Amino acid sequence: MISRSERVLNYLILSVFALFALYPLLSIVSAALAPPGQVPAFLPTDITWGNFAEAWDLGRFGTYLRTSAVVSTSVVVLATVFSVMAGYAFGTMHFRGSAVLFYVLLLGIMVPTEAIVVPLFFDLRDIGLTNTLLALVLPQTAQSVAFGTFWMRAYFRSSSRAMVEAARIDGAGHWRTLWSVLLPIGRPAMITMIVLVFMWTWNEFLIPLVMVTDESLRTAPLGLAFFQGQYTADFGLLAAGAAIVATPVVVVYLFLQRHFIRGMVEGAVKE
Amino acid sequence: MATSAAARSATLADARPPRAGGGRPPGEPRRVAYLYILPAYLVFALFLLIPLGRAVVLSLYDWNGLSVAEWVGLDNYRQVVADEGLRAAFGHAAVLIVFYAAFPVVVALALVATMTRARLRGLGFYRTVLFVPQIIAMVVVAVAWRQIYAPDGPLNQVLRAIGLDGLARAWLGDFVFALPAVGFIGTWVQMGLCIVLFLAGVSKIPRELYEAARLDGAGPVREFFAVVLPALRNEISVALTLTVIAALRNFDLVYVTTAGGPGTSTTVPSYEVYRRAFEIGQVGSAAAVAITLTAMIFVLTFGITRIAERGAA
């Protein structure tokens, strides 16, 4: 029972805020697609790929994307396997110390990267691990495992206890119960965890900034930061670089946006 | 049959607090649980817990990263309070909390309050668009906003076009306006999140509540405070938790937009951690700032959750 003018007003408000959310990103896309050297006021008149080609060569984004892909994939795979296993134990089994161990993990979710990156750098340097892929992958796996275990435990706790019992009565061991009974139904929870870990790892800036000096080990956001330091004047070029860095996460988001929103919103509600 | 028996034993198991030894359903695996959590906990301990403990230890030393460290007790923490530069950095963080958390929450609340009676179609589209700033790498966000704030960028062009030439300036290079300019980027990032959260919240309020309020003669303002605000308590708590933490962990944005400048007008604790540890060789002080920042995040997160829970009781 809402009047027509009220409905129009509602859409108007939403549209204004939607435009506000999109404007900075559209300004990047339009500057990147405009002919090199031009910065369009709103939308480019001609669409060219010149900025992309030049940024790709000058900025070595091919290398950076490859590093980012390797790091993100490694973190996602490790964190997913470890979190599923740990979440299964915390969610379905009784064992001494489980509460304490779980709460320590919960605290770990809140620890900011700033707090661990300083000792990590100096200790990894002492054992010769800085400037390696491991220095990028392992700390981020640790952070992701804290969230992932919390997330998967919530799923395993909510999953039907009766099904676990039934599987056991059918003679399935705990290992088979996990992989052939619980995980197939738990796919949505797992996808949510995977897309979040992927996004966090892809977008991470501080850890790569501190851990690597080797140019071939720079991740995409780090490469973009260096690129911007060199080509401040040419916004079209910079915008093309920024678009290249943002695209992988945006593509995943377009397909799985429900998972992003659900995960980031529910992930904040501890217990 | 088997299912109902299993369900019954499950409720029994749930009703009883798990004790070591007895009280658990037969066949329940127990020790094997340690094997399941081992890989996760090993990585977690080696690369998060131990570094956190090492940060606490480092914060008690004076160390430049190379020579022998010297024990100074709590001196580095005294510096956090006494040192003007660090005090300023925490002050800037407080300003940024207003921009990252207070503004988006208040504006989003006002917004959904005017929209409460709507059951709009196409909300999914708006949700997708409004949430986008949350998923973009901060470096990309910083590149976009540096251009918007540039001396000849869109913001100044608009100001000049409407005759406000006096206001046009190099926003990120201005001693007074750089911090609010960085803060406003935070407002932009968090605004959509808050709107999406609150819209989901109001859509769960039963229609009868509004009707009851209206029958009692409540106007839109009373309706907001009596119906909408209490119903959104959880969503507000989630929004505040996420946005306050984001305001305290904004290293990337500051590093790329202003690097703390001009002067020290946009330094923040997370930037000071990096600068002290890796640029000016004050590792102990950097660790003390990092631990203080971590403590603040813990306290604020628990505080926000507690207030929300007490309000509900």
Image (cartoon, coloured by chain):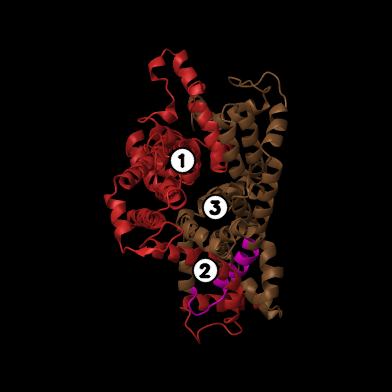
Q: What subunit carries mark 3?
A: A
The single residue placed furthest to the front in the displayed view is B67
In the shown orientation, is residue B279 left or right of residue A157? left
Q: Does residue A97 show up magenta in the picture? A: yes
Give how far across and how far down residue B234 sits, in percent: 42, 51
Between the C-alphas of marks 2 and 3, the distance is 18 Å
Q: Is residue B249 magenta?
A: no
Q: Hey, what amino acid is under mark 1?
A: Val
Tag 3's secondary structure? Answer: helix
Label 1 sits on residue: B254
Q: Nearer the viewer, residue B133 or A222?
A: A222
* Residue type of the residue flagged with mark 3: Ile
Of badges 2 and 3, nearer the viewer stands 3
Which residue lies at the image location 50% right of the left edge and 87% below the top edge? B21
Q: Residues within 10 Å of mark 1 (few under 14, many from 20)?
A: many
Drawing shade for chain A: brown
Residue B165 position (above or below residue B76): above
Gap between marks 1 and 3, in whole Å?
Answer: 15 Å
Residue B6, x across and y down, in percent: 61, 77
Say whether residue A19 is left or right of residue B113. right
Magenta stretch bounds: A79-98
Going from N to C along the chain, the mark reached first, 2 or 1, is: 2
